[in-house]
Amino acid sequence: MPPPSTSPSARETELLELAYEWTLEHGLSDLSLRPLAAAIGSSPRVLLFLFGSKEELVRRLLARAREDELAWLRSHEPATRGLAGTLVETWAWLADPAHDALLRIWVEAYARSLVDPTGPWGDFARTTVEDWIGLLARAQPASERRTARGRNRRTLALAVLRGGLLDLLATGDRARVDAAVRVAAAELELPG
């Protein structure tokens, strides 16, 4: 007898995508199965059957959000742009209003994973830092990647991106935050 299939059914995939679209609009922190199920044409019972628990559904939604982020990271080869160029280009992607909903989910999940590392949020913050540090490391010459200075410079670049994102989402002051990111990028180009 063959082992049971571990790949999701078509209905599970469909409901996950619908739940993801709903989550982009409504967030994750107050997720309740009943309103979610009604909004996506399902029932709490079906969601629990397909996903096992509300926590597992949240885990799967976070993984789905991360797929969007990782798709951009995989499509982006920063080696020819250097650290400063990658900072500016990454910021342009983060600051694009088309990504606001995804980035609000990211901020929510990041914060929740710091408070509740054992829940469905798990190690979201840590793995996100590793993902972005990896992108920034690839933007540096190999000789710089291995140095403390190189590590510090990419950590600074990540801090600028993360801080700028939080500021932009909080204030909507795109011009001011864009200008600050350009200043940080210029500082990263300076030898030192």
Image: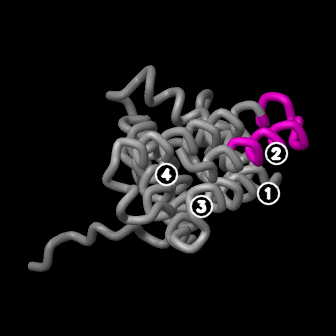
How many C-alpha atoms fall within 10 Å of the one at disc 2: few (<14), some, or many (≥20)? Answer: some
* Disc nearest the viewer among 1 and 3: 1
Real-space Cα separation, disc 1 to disc 3, in angstroms: 18 Å
**Where residue 33 sits in the image (x, y, percent)?**
57, 37
Query: Earlier along the polypeptide chain: callout 3 or callout 2?
Result: 3
Relative to 51, 84 lies left or right = right
Distance Cα–Cα, label 1 vs label 4: 20 Å
Q: Which mark is residue 17?
A: 3
Q: What colour scheme does the image use?
A: one colour
Of labels 1 and 4, the one closer to you: 4
CA gap, disc 1 and disc 2: 16 Å
Spot occupied by residue 128 in the image (x, y as percentages of width and height): 46, 46
Of the 4 image quadrants, the one containing the N terminus is bottom left
Mark 1 vs mark 3: which is more N-terminal? 3
Secondary structure state at the residue bearing disc 3 = helix
Q: Which residue is mark 4?
A: 132
Which label lies toward us, 1 or 2?
Answer: 2
Identity, as a three-letter code, of the amino acid under mark 1: Ala
Q: Which mark is residue 18?
A: none
Task: Give me the C-alpha separation between circle 4 and circle 2.
Answer: 19 Å
Circle 1 sits in a helix, a strand or a loop, which is it?
A: helix
Among numbered discs 1 and 2, the one appearing first in the sequence = 1
Residue visible at 73% across and 47% down in the picture = 101
Circle 2 residue? 178
Cα distance in 3D space between marks 3 and 2: 32 Å
How crowded is the residue under tag 4: few (<14 C-alpha within 10 Å), some, or many (20+)?
many
The mark nearer the N terminus, 4 or 2, is 4
Stretch of the chain drawn in magenta: 168-184
The residue lying at 32 percent from left, 28 percent from top is 118
